Image: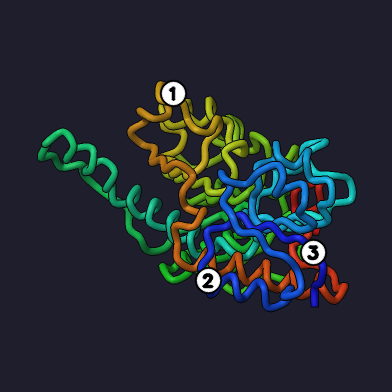
Amino acid sequence: MLTGKNILVVLPISEEQKEKLEKYADKSCFTYTSYKKATKEMVRKANIIIGNIDPDLLEYAEHLEWLQLNSAGADAYMKKGVLPEGTVLTNATGAYGPGVAEHMLVVLFSIQKKLHLYRDNQNQCQWSDEGEVMSLQGGTALIVGLGDIGLYFARLLKNFGYRIIGIKRRPGQVPQGVDELYTMEQLDELLPEADVVFSALPDTKATRKIFCKKRFQKMKRSAILLNAGRGSAVDTEDLCQALISGEIYAAGLDVTDPEPLPSQHKLWNMQNAVITPHISGDFHHPATLYRIVDIAAGNLKRYGVGEPLENVVDVQTGYRK
């Protein structure tokens, strides 16, 4: 049992979820607030913070031992000098699979059936036939970043008869729902096979602008790029040119670079782009917050008995250790 700790929680959780956290630390002091209402004094007292605290406040974290994020991405906390030295950083990998994958599946289907074009027509009060559409069944999907989100998306697509090719940083056993597994070194040779390319990559030095002009040129002209990881994985200018020239068929983006996307950016006006404002994650899907609390509660239990925490982030790579 965790005792004598000041635990700051910056999540919009219910009384039931508070009980779940406090079950493993009932002899510690919990403070519940929101991201916007967290204060310097709250952070100064905290030994443990659960939730994505404003990184600028961490300079006041004199006693912080462990930060449990409510996001899978940790890039804002990996910059030099943000985290106090010796602080353990854990993320919420495993919480976002259903929310992000289901959102991106609907984006894919809307592109394949041209629903975005019909919505544009509706806004213009225009009765117009947009012609041939794609089948939802079959095809090859290349999942780049086969973590929780990528794997959940792969399994959803498998229900529609897709051949699933996964890419991970390291080789390993082929997961259920995936037909073939490769590493990033095979990306260029796999791109020409894919009808759908799904990126769930984090923001790291190795992944920035990995989808660029030379890679769009390797893709099918009928290919659809989906990005649900970080906008930095895509060279935005190169993507715009690929969409204009028809090097690829379309793009579905829940993340962009820059972000937020400026109102005058030409990407907004690409007829063959569907853009949502980084909302597939967050707490929009009912299951997400429950999963985050489960991860945090499990780690509180481990922390109290001195066991290794789950989802510890390697601050050099941005990935889980």
Instruction: Say which mark, if any, is on residue 5.
Output: 3
| Label 3 – label 1 distance at C-alpha | 47 Å
Say whether residue 276 is visible. yes
The local crowd at label 3, few if under 14, some if 14 to 19, many if 20 or more residues have their Cα within 10 Å, is: some
The local crowd at label 1, few if under 14, some if 14 to 19, many if 20 or more residues have their Cα within 10 Å, is: few
| Label 3 – label 2 distance at C-alpha | 20 Å
Q: Is residue 125 above or below residue 25?
A: above
The N terminus: image quadrant: bottom right
Residue 6 placement (x, y as % from top left): 76, 60
Relative to residue 228, is residue 135 drawn left or right? left
Residues tagged 3 and 2 counted as in contact (Cβ below 8 A): no
Structure colour scheme: rainbow
Instruction: Say which mark, if any, is on residue 15.
Output: 2
In the image shown, does 5 or 234 lie closer to the viewer? 5
In the image shown, does 100 or 197 lie closer to the viewer? 100
User: Of marks 3 and 2, which one's residue comes earlier in the chain?
Assistant: 3
Question: Given this view, does label 3 or label 1 mark the residue nearer the observer?
Answer: 3
Instruction: Say which mark, if any, is on residue 188.
Output: none
Tag 2: residue type? Answer: Glu
